Image (cartoon, rainbow, N blue to C red):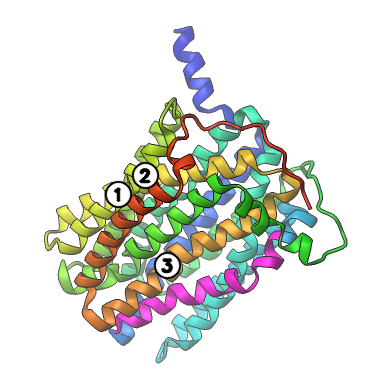
Amino acid sequence: MRHDESDAAERFAAFRHRSFTRYWIARFLSAFGMQVISVAVGWQIYDLTRNPFDLGLIGLVQFLPSLVLILVTGAVADRFGRRMIMGICEIVALFAAAALVFLTLRGLTSPLPVFAVLLVIGITRAFFAPASTSLAPNLVPEEDLANAIAWNSMSWQGATILGPVAGGLLYGIGASVPYWTSVVLFFIGAILIFSIPRPEQQRGVHNQSWETLSAGFRYIWREKIVLGAISLDMFAVLLGGAVALMPVFARDILDLGPWGLGLLRAAPGVGAVAMALYLAAHPFRSRAGATMFVAVGIFGAATTVFGMSTIAWVSIAALAVMGAADMISVYVRQTLIQLWTPDALRGRVSAVNMVFIGASNELGEFRAGGMAALIGAVPAVVVGGIGAMGIAGVWAILFPALRKIQRLRKVDHESQAV
């Protein structure tokens, strides 16, 4: 019994720290609200225009702020209070959701006003992501950090399960209901974040220059293992991403409604949460790098199956496998970054990482939408899945040190914060 209790305590180690618990709930609510908005906007825009290219634009509009502001957002997270940045971003997101309520009630005749609001949300996410990612190591000791990262991944993936389903159901009740729900979620998240006591944080230098702003890039370039992990995930998901086209598959290929779209959007999260729960209890003991490459290959294969399927349950199962495989890559990448990066550099490195993630997700959605407009949704997804499998093989050759990593742990190396 004592052994079982010890295992349970280790599995929930990060939640021994009250500040982390509030932070975790706030992140979950924020991600949940964003997922609800994402499903509602996707269905609303496609229902209005019936153009898959517009679905790609949804991702592009949200990605561009992260790219344009990359040197600013990370430096801000290193110089100012990360908790305060998160709270301000929640408030801005609340007003953006309220704007979507207003536009919906007024009646949409063009997607342009929605794109404008999504641009604001993209700016919010550009500042929120590096601040929230960098705050976790300030809330738990180093020995609990890997556990905190696994639970953070579960927070996001749990939101990707519940958020899309809720978004589809709420949209069925009324087009403005998902946005009202997000307003409430962002409000509660802001309260939780501001209730966290101000944590200790190593501040970056105050005299900002190109050297300090670009420190995140230079650090990642020096750490080839981190560079390989980040770029592998970026290119694999950039090619294999199929999220943007799910409204097309739900409406035109699988003959499902908004609720069915919610199920499709939730399926990757189901697989990811199952894998995250397993990783929280069974961290890698060996062959972590090789396992990540295999997982990326499986992600590409499952994407190909999804693109070719015309049966709903097969499509949902393929998406669940995609989510589980992607979670392995996320877990390895995030653990490496957080354990190996000095605290004074975490914001800038996280900002670069968020751009890579944005490129793989939102820019991947634009890639999928553009290809679908040219060659059709099914070929766009199938070609992307095959490309993701190819990326796994090429990167295994280009980054042998990453492939040979055994356990995820902090290594002895000297890194100077700039």
Q: In the rendered structure, which segment of residues is drawn in magenta?
A: 51-74
Could you say which quadrant of the image residue 307 lies in? bottom left
Q: Amino acid at mark 1?
A: Gly
Q: Amino acid at mark 3?
A: Ser
The answer to whether residue 98 is above or below residue 147 is below
**Residue at position x 27%, y 77% in the image:** 372
- Badge number at residue 293: 2
The answer to whether residue 12 is above or below residue 179 is above
- Badge number at residue 324: none
**What residue is shown with label 1?**
297
Could you say which quadrant of the image residue 386 lies in? bottom left
Q: Earlier in the sequence, mark 3 or mark 1?
A: 3
* Left or right, residue 232 beside residue 168: right
Of helix, strand and loop, which mostly describes the magenta segment?
helix
Q: Amino acid at mark 2?
A: Phe
Crowd rating for badge 3 (residues with CA inside 10 Å; few <14, some 14–19, many 20+): many
Give the structural element (helix, strand or loop) at label 3: helix
CA separation, marks 3 and 1?
A: 27 Å
Crowd rating for badge 2 (residues with CA inside 10 Å; few <14, some 14–19, many 20+): many
The residue lying toward the viewer, choosing from 269 and 380, is: 380
**What residue is shown with label 3?**
38
Crowd rating for badge 1 (residues with CA inside 10 Å; few <14, some 14–19, many 20+): many
Residue 232 belongs to magenta span: no
**Residue at position x 50%, y 59% in the image:** 357
Give the structural element (helix, strand or loop) at label 2: helix
* Pointers 2 and 3 in contact (C-beta within 8 Å): no
* Left or right, residue 264 beside residue 31: left
Q: Earlier in the sequence, mark 2 or mark 3?
A: 3
* Pointers 1 and 2 in contact (C-beta within 8 Å): yes
CA separation, marks 2 and 3?
A: 29 Å
Residue 300 percent location from the top left of the image: 28, 55
